[in-house]
Image (cartoon, rainbow, N blue to C red):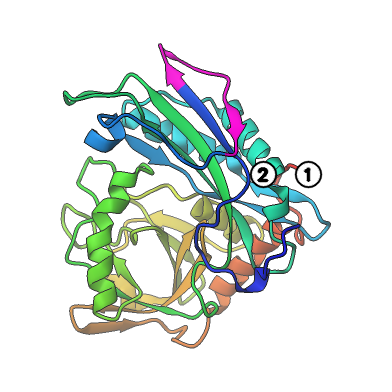
Amino acid sequence: MKNIDWANIGFEYMQTDQRYVSNYKDGKWDDGCLTHDANVVINECAGILQYCQECFEGLKAYTTEDGSIVTFRPDLNAERMMDSAARLEMPQFPKERFLAAVDAVVKANAEWVPPYGSGATFYLRPYMFASGPVIGVKPSDEYQFRIFGTPVGPYFKGGVKPLTLCVSDFDRAAPHGTGHIKAGLNYAMSLHAHSVAHGAGYDENMFLDPATRTYVEETGGANFLFITKDNEVVTPKSDSILPSITRRSLVYVAEHYLGLKVTQRPVALAELADFAECGLCGTAAVISPVGKVVDHGKEICFASGMSEMGPITKKLYETLTGIQMGRIEAPEGWIRKIM
């Protein structure tokens, strides 16, 4: 294992030993391989540079309580990336090859996977982009699929403390657009809004539905999860939010491990004050509690407060991370053991 102060690393890129690369040309993917070269060399007219044909995924490898190295539901990442590629007129990278590539990258960088109990994890970034030259507005004929890994600490430094969000004046996605796929273009669109929010002293944005601007959608990089005063879990339903694997997993945990009622439905901005707890869920942080939302000067405070995670949110967090780390038995197929 690498000599790193695992407990104090940030959520930042650290170059590791090997990464996976496969190229698509003449209508098929090549065999792919691991490489020590961290640089990407492409034509100046590559489709990614001209028309932003790109999609990506994010998942983690963990060292579990028994010393194994595992990934969490990587099959869903493979399937979501295939959906993203199809929407962007890119060739799909086959699911079984995706899973084998993830395994290969983790094995090749095993010394970089943080130890159990350190609070750090090994973040994996599969991505695909148009590598062939294209000057007319059309899909490229050539693509590259890559996966690299990097050890990361907690997404939010300083521990899990409730966040303050602002209702954004910007739209994250367009109606019938690409909000439901994991494409870099969606995140580029959110950067200005994120900077504006940070500049005003907020931790994150709450984006509303782009059609009516009355329903809650998501932040720039996480889905919402609400808890009612009688402990019902509610998640927003919309065609323009990303189908979070973490959110889907938390919903299952809520129903099958904690015996809670779960409802997926449109959530109106006007009803936020009725909820007891609010959280943001995603791969990076699992769940981050939200203490209050500010809607153009009007403060909407959740009963769970600004000092700690709400009781139901905390149970959800502890149960899911317990499953990921091997302390709690996982549903069949959720954990893929690599080493």
User: Where is the C terminus found, in terms of image quarters?
Assistant: top right
Spot occupied by residue 229 in the image (x, y as percentages of width and height) = 46, 77
Disc 2 crowd rating (10 Å Cα; few below 14, some 14-19, many 20+) is: many
Residue plotted at (34% across, 45% down): 184
Q: Which of 305 and 39 is in front in this view?
A: 39
**SS class, disc 1:** loop
Which contiguous range is marked in magenta?
24-36
Labelled pair 1, 2 in contact (Cβ < 8 Å)? yes
258 to the left or right of 87: right
- Badge 1 amino acid: Met
- Badge 2 amino acid: Val
Spot occupied by residue 56 in the image (x, y as percentages of width and height) = 43, 42
Q: Mark 2 points at which residue?
A: 106
Q: In which quarter of the image is residue 326?
A: bottom right
Q: In which quarter of the image is residue 200?
A: bottom left
**SS class, disc 2:** helix
Q: Name the residue under label 1.
A: 339
